[in-house]
């Protein structure tokens, strides 16, 4: 049975409830994973989502910061969360669909502005978070699983608008890309999006600072969909809904989609 999944850093689910509704009405993914919800779980505006058929939600939240949620038209079981790097942040939640697929929804720390853990505590926290992810997947290698979210790293040269200019910019530094690759290897993960769209520049985030983000097109691919090796061949139809970046009161991220035949 095929199901379509989308991941989207929404940058406040309450502030941007109208565009979440727009996405659900127009695109109808079976599962929508949100990051940076910036809301306690009980304040997430579920009424309109449920009216559209998304009656199932598992989430972890905190007031004003972080937060992850999985909205689903399909029954989904809450299978927990992990506090990577001991930050006490709502950055991970996992759910299991009735077809046995486990979905991990992640919001990896952004890492601040300076790529040096000696002078920037947030960068150190980001690297520690990724190290803990690596160690967890190495110790308990996932099966029949999908990992999605804002991982805050653009790993490939064509995942950023200018590779050379961004080599010393947080999200594209060599040490971050190395940690990213270590997490993938530890879990046996495959990059679903790039399996489906192997060539060319591809972005999911454009800064609010750009006066005309679309024309300037200085983007980065920070949002990802991965699958374990046992189901990666069932994934297809990946795409980035770039138009959503131009919706009214948008997030600075665009949703990323993939369909799985399982």
Image (spheres, rainbow, N blue to C red):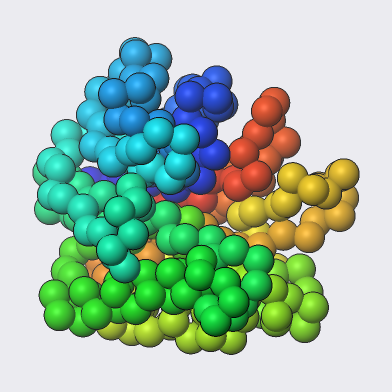
Q: Quadrant of residue 169?
A: bottom right
Q: Residue at x 13, y 49 (%)?
A: 79
Say which of 26 and 95 sits in front: 95
Report the quarter where the C terminus lies. bottom left
Q: Is residue 103 left or right of residue 236?
A: left
- Residue 186 in view of the camera: yes
Give x and y (percent) for residue 4.
37, 45
Q: Residue at x 72, y 36 (%)?
A: 246
Q: Quadrant of residue 141?
A: bottom left
Say which of 192 and 32 sits in front: 32
Q: Quadrant of residue 65?
A: top left
Say which of 213 and 62 sits in front: 62
Determine whether 89 is above or below 25 in the image.
Answer: below
Determine whether 169 is above or below 211 in the image.
Answer: below
Q: Is residue 166 left or right of residue 139?
A: right
Q: Is residue 73 left or right of residue 139?
A: right
Which residue is farthest front?
119
Give x and y (percent) for residue 205.
64, 53
Give x and y (percent) for residue 254.
59, 46
């Amino acid at each position: 049975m095929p199901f379509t999944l989308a991941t989207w850093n929404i940058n406040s689910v309450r502030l941007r409830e109208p565009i979440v509704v727009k996405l659900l009405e127009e695109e109808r993914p079976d599962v929508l994973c949100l990051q940076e919800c910036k809301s306690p779980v009980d304040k997430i505006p579920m009424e309109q989502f449920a009216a559209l058929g998304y009656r199932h939600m598992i989430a972890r939240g905190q007031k004003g910061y972080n937060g992850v949620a999985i909205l689903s038209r399909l029954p989904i079981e809450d299978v927990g969360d992990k506090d990577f790097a001991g930050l006490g942040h709502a950055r991970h939640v996992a759910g299991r669909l009735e077809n046995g697929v486990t979905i991990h929804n992640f919001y990896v720390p952004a890492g601040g502005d300076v790529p040096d853990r000696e002078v920037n505590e947030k960068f150190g926290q980001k690297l520690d978070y990724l190290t803990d992810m690596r160690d967890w997947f190495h110790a308990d290698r996932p099966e029949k699983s999908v990992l999605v979210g804002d991982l805050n790293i653009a790993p490939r040269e064509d995942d950023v608008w200018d590779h050379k200019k961004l080599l010393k910019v947080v999200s594209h530094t060599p040490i971050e890309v190395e940690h990213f690759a270590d997490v993938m290897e530890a879990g046996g993960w495959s990059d679903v999006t790039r399996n489906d769209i192997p060539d060319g520049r591809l972005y999911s985030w454009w800064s609010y600072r750009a006066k005309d983000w679309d024309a300037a097109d200085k983007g980065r691919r920070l949002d990802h969909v991965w699958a374990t090796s046992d189901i990666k061949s069932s994934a297809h139809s990946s795409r980035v809904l770039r138009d959503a970046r131009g919706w009214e009161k948008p997030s600075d991220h665009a949703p990323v989609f993939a369909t799985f035949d399982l």
